[in-house]
Image (cartoon, rainbow, N blue to C red):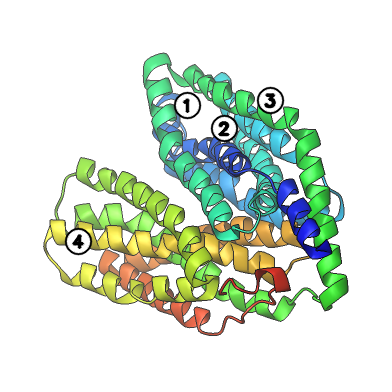
Amino acid sequence: MIMNETEKSNKAEQPGAGYSYLMMGGHTCCDINQASVPALLPFLVAQRGIDYTSAAGLMFASSFLSSFIQPLFGLIADRKQMPWLMGAGILIAGIGISSIGLLDTYWSIFAAIMFAGLGSALFHPEGGRMANCVAGEKKGRGMSNFSVGGNLGFVIGPIIAVFAVSTFGLRGISVILIPTSAMAAVFFCMQKKFMYLSNLQQREIKGKAAGSGQKDDWLAFARLCVPIFARSIMQSGLQAFVPLYWVGVLSQTTEQGSLMVTVIACASVVGAFSGGRLADRFGFRHTSRIALAPVFPLIVLMLLTKSVWVATVLVVLIVVTSSTTQSPMVVLGQKYLPNRLGLASGVTFGLAISMGGICSPLLGAIGDRYGLTAALYVVSGVALVAFVGTLFLKEPVVSVENSSVPE
């Protein structure tokens, strides 16, 4: 009877599904800022006179520093509960991007984009930890919602940027402050509730660790980093070279090549939405393995076909299946480091993304020397490495109350 009353009490304290969708909305409003930078580059080249090398430098400012300092903020979040970082991160990211239209010099624009990247670094570790916190027993679904939010941001961000700048000029990018400031205000108003849920989760983690002796499994987390980083490199390669492949190899128009960027982004949303839900039902390791298994042969088939329609279908399948693994792998990282959720989120969301960006120039060099097809064959090899890496993933320790859920 006592256990029944305790279970009822725990269920009563579980956050509702609305919190998970709030985290999804926050992730969207944060990532529309970073996603708008590539869409702004043509306007900056035309209206601010920067060259292509300088434009590439702005992409570096947008993602590189932000991705590498996210684990640091994750460590800080693990030591001290600071839900206000989420609202601050969204607001800082919006301020950084919206100020671009008011700036004339390259280095001031560079600094503004770095400032926006700082906001992204503030949001993601605490956001990933809180997404886990409010997910309750459905960790896969909760992290799936959070991942969908980020993918939606990368779909919506360029649309907002192009529409605003085309209509109002570069100063029009300031409209991005409307959704970001509104969402930041909502997050600031929710601070007390977030702090309560965060403290509740910390008590549960400490109670489970004391009862089962569960510790952070750093070796298992290191093994997980292999498929996570490889998948990131693969996805960055696809995003960069599929549009160019459409034009340079399949002889399509520039507009049709650019359209593939939208196709890839939409397919990523579908994969991110389904991944966590499948993982809750079939297990996080199994979902990751099964989803990555067909990616290598699908990329090879895409490179062998001369049909644009067949190639498009194959790209959709490739992106959907690879994106399906995003939230299951993030949850696995959090399960391997149950006492370091912020750090796990910072690495799997932040550092993982940076690995794709770091290796993109190397893939570009291969493409320049040996051709786009060769570069994409290398991408297929990276996909194979990602799948093989999942074969070495360890089953995380499962608490008694969740032992019925496969991992």
Which three-letter amino acid code belongs to the residue tagged 4? Ala
Image quarter (top left, top right, bottom left or bottom right) of the C terminus: bottom right
Place residue 237 in its image quadrant.
bottom left
The residue identified by callout 1 is 48
Disc 1 or 3, which lies upstream in sequence? Answer: 1
- Asked which secondary structure carries label 3, the reply is helix
- The residue mark sitting in front, 2 or 4, is 4
Give the alpha-carbon distance from disc 3 to disc 2, as whole Å.
Answer: 31 Å
Question: 270 or 257, which is in the foreground?
Answer: 270
Determine which of the numbered discs, if any, sits on residue 242 in the image. Answer: none
Mark 2, Cα crowd under 10 Å, few <14 / some 14-19 / many 20+, is some
- Image: 49 above or below 24: above
Q: Give coordinates of residue 172: x percent, y percent.
A: 48, 18
- Asked which secondary structure carries label 4, the reply is helix
Determine which of the numbered discs, if any, sits on residue 185 in the image. Answer: 3
The residue depicted at 60 percent of the width and 59 percent of the height is 139
State yes or no: discs 1 and 2 in contact (Cβ < 8 Å): yes
The residue identified by callout 2 is 106
Give the alpha-carbon distance from disc 1 to disc 3, as whole Å.
Answer: 33 Å
- Image: 14 above or below 36: below
